[in-house]
Image (cartoon, rainbow, N blue to C red):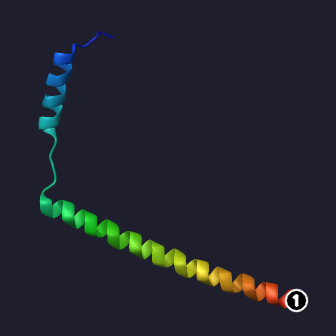
């Protein structure tokens, strides 16, 4: 594998960066909002599952004592 000079490397990086399609501000905000909504939904789901399992364990433990 041939070694690349630092100048050539920088040129290649700039060339590749120019090919990137950057998201618009609106697309970024929409994506961020969707991430927050999904995180809240998953957190609520696991909170409810944990609450249910906790109640089930407490019930099972109360039967033995």
The residue to which callout 1 is attached is 65
Which image quadrant for residue 39? bottom left
Badge count? 1
Which image quadrant for residue 15? top left
In the image, is residue 49 above or below residue 28?
below
Relative image position of residue 40 (x, y in whole percent): 40, 74
50 left or right, relative to 15: right
Q: Residue at x 45, y 72 (%)?
A: 42
Q: Residue furthest top?
A: 2
Quadrant into which the N terminus falls: top left
Specify few, some or many for label 1: CA neighbours under 10 Å numbering under 14, 14-19, or 20 or more: few
Q: Residue at x 28, y 10 (%)?
A: 3
In the image, is residue 47 above or below residue 29?
below
Tell me the element at label 1.
loop
Relative image position of residue 23 (x, y in whole percent): 16, 54
Relative image position of residue 22 (x, y in whole percent): 15, 48
Q: Residue at x 21, y 66 (%)?
A: 30
Q: Residue at x 81, y 89 (%)?
A: 62
30 left or right, relative to 63: left
Q: Residue furthest right?
A: 65
Relative image position of residue 28 (x, y in whole percent): 20, 60
In the image, is residue 8 above or below residue 54?
above
Which image quadrant for residue 60? bottom right
Quadrant into which the C terminus falls: bottom right
44 left or right, relative to 34: right
In the image, is residue 13 above or below residue 53?
above
């Amino acid at each position: 594998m041939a070694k690349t000079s630092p100048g050539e490397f920088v040129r290649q990086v700039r060339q590749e960066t120019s090919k990137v399609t950057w998201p618009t501000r609106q697309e970024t905000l929409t994506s961020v909002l969707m991430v927050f909504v999904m995180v809240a939904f998953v957190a609520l789901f696991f909170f409810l599952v944990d609450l249910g399992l906790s109640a089930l364990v407490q019930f099972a433990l109360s039967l033995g004592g």
